[in-house]
Amino acid sequence: MSDPRPVLAGVMGWPIGHSRSPRLFDHWFGRLGLPGRYVPLRVAEADFAEVYRALPRAGFRGVNVTVPHKLAALALADQVSDTARRIGAANMIRFDPDQGIVADNTDAYGFAQNLRQSAPDWRAAAGPALVLGAGGAARAVLDALLAEGAPQIRLANRTPAAAEGLAAEFGPRVQPVAWDRRAEAAAGCATLVNATSLGMAGGAALEMPLDDAPRTALVTDIVYTPLLTPLLTAAKARGMPVVDGLGMLLHQARPAFVAWFGIDPPVDAALRAACLAP
Ligand code: ATR
């Protein structure tokens, strides 16, 4: 007789209530006829290690990990992928019966794949990129843009030391620029990325004048609430190609689904609609 128990996965974070990942996975479970459950796990930092190590014994195939656990998830893993090591954080964990806790990072893949799907003509190699932010998301964006062949990445961050640290770590193609010179730094760029949390609904706004940016430059934002951030709205109004950040969330989930359940799920308009439903 087949095992009637549902397959289990989830997301560990604090807070976790805003996560759209459960909807995303529920959509795939329903569509693919898989008896799965994707559970939001609200776990405090002090409890992380204990809960993380216990989950395989509770039947979990794997988990996504979000703020503030991405570093701890990496540090406590038995095996770490090269990508996760380069980015310095894990967002996707697979519990393997033989190998133990296997940590990976699918954010860089999600970022690049979103651009490939939504802007098929975009080429990172076409010119320099300007990236705003030097946090965890920015690290994944840098990794992706370097892999895609960006000849130079201008990195602007409110706290200059963080941008300088990333430049030292990611190599000479990453050039720190002063936060208050970010508008001029867009000159000649092929790609502009907001990888800060600015522009999120209810939060501080991002001031980013686009007058110096080429009209052909692709503009994308890791913020996806709202879907059209003020940056994307301004870029659109100038006739620039824009890609919203929801696609990064959708695409980063795909390799997780493959790793946990062995099925390659579709990333398409129906998945997007399921995530956007009120
Ligand atoms: P994430 O994992 O989403 O990248 P994070 O690591 O906390 O989150 O990084 C947040 C990014 O947004 C940082 O680059 C941060 O700049 P600092 O390094 O100076 O903190 C940026 N950020 C957040 N609030 C900001 C603000 N009000 N002005 C400018 N940058 C801001």
Image (cartoon, rainbow, N blue to C red):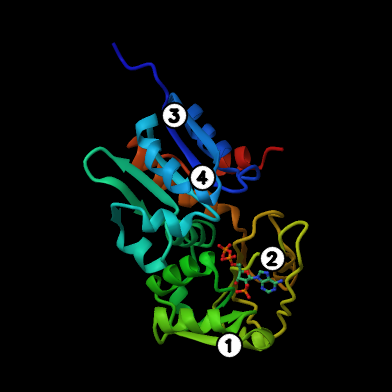
Mark 4 belongs to which amino acid? Answer: Met
Mark 1 belongs to which amino acid? Answer: Val
Residue position for label 2: 232
Residue closer to the observer: 77 or 26: 77
Residue position for label 4: 12
Nearer-N-terminus badge (2/4): 4
Which secondary structure lies at badge 4? strand
Q: Nearer the viewer, mark 3 or mark 1?
A: 1
Residue at mark 1 to residue at mark 2: CA–CA distance: 22 Å
Residue at the (72%, 38%) spot, across then down: 278
From the top left corner, tell me how far across and down residue 125 is, in percent. 43, 77
Disc 2 beta carbon < 8 A from ligand 1? no
Nearer-N-terminus badge (3/1): 3
Nearer-N-terminus badge (3/4): 4
Mark sitting on residue 257 = none
- Ligand 1 is found in the corner quadrant, namely bottom right
Residue 170 appears in which quarter of the rendering?
bottom left
Which secondary structure lies at badge 2? helix
Mark 2 belongs to which amino acid? Answer: Leu
- Inspect this view and state whether residue 154 appears: no
Which secondary structure lies at badge 1? strand
Residue closer to the observer: 238 or 8: 8
Please rate how many residues cluster around mark 4, counting C-alpha atoms within 10 Å: few if below 14, some from 14 to 19, many from 20: many
Residue position for label 1: 177
Left or right of residue 52, residue 248 in this image: right
Residue position for label 3: 32
Which secondary structure lies at badge 3? helix
Q: Nearer the viewer, mark 1 or mark 2?
A: 1
Residue at mark 2 to residue at mark 3: CA–CA distance: 33 Å
Cβ–Cβ under 8 Å for marks 2 and 4? no
Left or right of residue 209, residue 26 in this image: left
Residue at mark 1 to residue at mark 4: CA–CA distance: 34 Å
